[in-house]
Image (cartoon, rainbow, N blue to C red):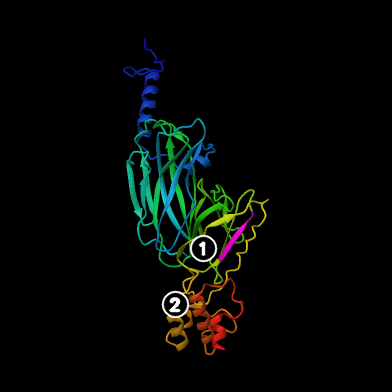
Amino acid sequence: MSSRYTGTRTLGNPPIAAWHRAAVFLVAACIQHLPLAPIAALSSAGVAVQGAVTAAPTAGLPAETVSVPITLTLDPGVHASTLGMTLSVDALNGAPTLRRPVSFLPGAALPAPDVLKVQSNDTVRIEWNTPWNPPLTGTVLLGLLEVRLAATAPGQAYDVEVGNLGATTDGVIVLPLAGVTGRIARCSVRFSGHVTDALTSGAIADAVACLQGGSTCVHTDGSGFYSGLCDSGQSSAGTTVCANALGYRQSCQGPWTASGSNITVDFQLLPAGAATPTPTPSPPIAACVGDCDGDGRVDITELLRGVNIGLGVLPPAACPAFDYSADCGPSPPESVACLIRAVNNALTACPPTTDAGDTLVQRLSK
């Protein structure tokens, strides 16, 4: 009697469950050697991102090397074990292309990347394929992208794009991240300085320094210093810089016209409720004709200087103390009157005012 095979297995094959386990391990092994999944594919699939890699906005003068911080920020409870990204610099608005290749300096808290390859003057690929131990959490500085700006055409800009981005939580499970573009502004003038309280001289933290009009602003740090305030479109009339802080009056300085420079502009802000200080007038200082050095007396050296001024040997600026009133000056006949007053001051003392009556020497000379 013939028989018909009705089973679902082939003699000599392992059970289906074993095949299934083997296939899973094989796929997992392959995943570890594949490029990390790009975020574009994840986004198109509707996968919610759980963090971001951000290129921070920066500014630099022509022919200057700027450092662009590249930062990983993860959502609470999320960690990363591996990460890969491509950083590219795109010229905007006709800005010249980079003539020198970019470079990447890994963060001091991280191991060296497994892959660090400069692909062109404006592109670099970085990968950490060996899992970090412990994994990264929170906000971490991945490193600095070094970009050498062209020496011409200030006012143009570049975008630093974070692309081909992917990460995993354990070397296998994909961690979806977003890439955030940062802009490099090319300055014609860059401002920095210190903001303090005009009454106490104490530093003002979190004050705001802005180009006039408020189009570009930066905040002071905990010690009251600000930096990197970039004017990328300076007019021929110059640029005015203003500073303000909560509870203080705004103060402005300028215009500044130096091009291609770093300019320091410090501010002393008055509290909003404080009265504007009125300078206390100094008491009038009695003029003492012939007292060139202002020490309250006239000596022979100063008298000789007055004689030389009268003769035209020295300019009047050699001793302005010989020119104090309408009837006493460096030119004849006023120079004679000045010398008479100076001699009298040398013999007696400097008078309290220059309007005193004739002294003995003056009366004898009449």
Residue range highlighted in magenta: 249-254
Q: Quadrant of the C terminus?
A: bottom right
Label drawn at residue 60: none
Residue 284 seen anywhere in this rendered image of the structure: yes
Label drawn at residue 232: 1
Q: Which residue is mark 2?
A: 302
Question: Which numbered disc, 2 or 1, marks the residue closer to the eye?
Answer: 2
Query: Do residues under tags 2 and 1 come within 8 Å of each other at their CB atoms?
Result: no
Q: Is residue 17 above or below residue 45?
A: above
In the rendered image, residue 336, in percent from the top left (x then y), is placed at 51, 87
Q: Is residue 203 magenta?
A: no
333 or 228: nearer the viewer: 333
Q: Residue at x 46, y 35 (%)?
A: 175
Q: Residue furthest top?
A: 1
In the rendered image, residue 183, in percent from the top left (x then y), is placed at 49, 54
Q: How many C-alpha atoms fall within 10 Å of the one at disc 1: few (<14), some, or many (≥20)?
A: many
Q: Is residue 250 magenta?
A: yes
Element under label 1?
A: loop
Which SS does the magenta portion mostly show?
Answer: strand
Count of numbered circles on the image: 2
Q: How many C-alpha atoms fall within 10 Å of the one at disc 2: few (<14), some, or many (≥20)?
A: many
Indicate which disc, 2 or 1, sits on the residue closer to the N terminus: 1
Mark 2 vs mark 1, CA separation in Å? 56 Å
Q: Is residue 34 above or below residue 163?
A: above
**Identity, as a three-letter code, of the amino acid under mark 2:** Glu
Residue 328 seen anywhere in this rendered image of the structure: no
207 or 272: nearer the viewer: 272
**Identity, as a three-letter code, of the amino acid under mark 1:** Ser
